[in-house]
Amino acid sequence: MSNENKSIYEFDFNLICEYYSNLERQGPGSPEATLKALGFIDNLTPQSHIADLGCGTGGQTMTLAQNTPGEITGLDLFPDFIKIFNRKAERDKLSNKVRGIVGSMDNLPFENESLDLIWSEGAIYNIGYERGLNEWKKFLKTGGYIAVSEVSWFTDERPQEINDFWMEHYSEIDTIPNKVAQMQKAGYIPTAIFILPETCWTDHFYAPQAKVQEEFLKKHAGNKSAENYVGFERYEMNLYYRYKEYYGYVFYIGKKR
Ligand code: SAM
């Protein structure tokens, strides 16, 4: 099987974790986009409870913590990410309001109706957008918000190559109006949507990977798995540069009815 046809799930998780541990973020985004999304949330107080699901090493969580009242729990499946997350919280003197825990987004450790805000940047795809919106709703208080970023089509039609890539890797990718309709159907009032600027991919996600890839390949010289993984990442980046007018990340913000 060529790298292009390999799913990310077929690579060694330890290698993936090591690769991404060296990056500030594990998905497209930026502090500016996080703050813009946060600007639509109007219910937070020092007593608020916020969960950041699929938080990774916490790039966006620390931005949130510096700009919101309330406590934030970051949750991620990978213990190594959570270790880095908690070290960052200490480094930034945020341990009093931010804590990272290991867990899975399909089995959340929160009480029903206990959260004021659920945040998830570039991570809800792990459970699926519709399933995540539906299953996570019970943890929100009425009037609580959900803010997720999700890969979406910008047009109704697109070239075969990019359509095939996404159908294979995340077939739930859909157009913005369809994603908004799914949010409404799941019981939220769609409050805001915006497309993340290209720089969230180019400057904040792909550019930092170039250096990481070089060091990663040097460290794992001769390791086919590592080489294939970098090959996959480079292929995905190349697709983005060629087809970025057809898809990108979109922030969807909704309020629980
Ligand atoms: N939110 C971070 C960001 O934007 O930089 C990370 C995004 S990364 C593309 C997706 C994250 O989801 C990874 O940190 C991964 O470990 C996490 N993840 C994957 N499956 C998960 C699950 N079932 N429960 C919780 N986290 C999960």
Image (tube, rainbow, N blue to C red):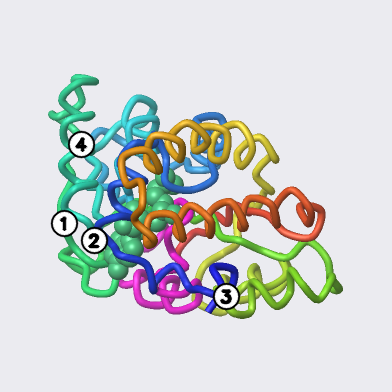
Q: Which amino acid lies under the numbered mark 3 shown in the image of this protein? A: Asn
User: Callout 1: 10 Å neighbours few (<14), some, many (20+)?
Assistant: some
**Which kind of residue does numbered mark 2 sit on?**
Leu
Which quadrant of the figure shows ligand 1? Answer: bottom left
Name the residue beneath numbered marker 4. 98
* Residue at the spot of label 2: 77
Left or right: residue 87 versus residue 134 is left
Say few, some or many: other residues with alpha carbon within 10 Å of mark 4 (under 14 / 14 to 19 / 20 or more).
many
In the image, 257 versus 102, the foreground residue is 102
Total numbered circles: 4
Q: Which mark is residue 102?
A: 1
Who comes first in sequence, dot 2 or dot 4?
Answer: 2
The Cα–Cα distance between marks 1 and 4, rounded to whole angstroms, is: 14 Å
- Whichever of callouts 3 and 1 sits on the residue coming sooner in the sequence is 3
User: Which residues are the magenta region?
Assistant: 120-145
Spatial CA distance of label 2 from label 1 is: 6 Å
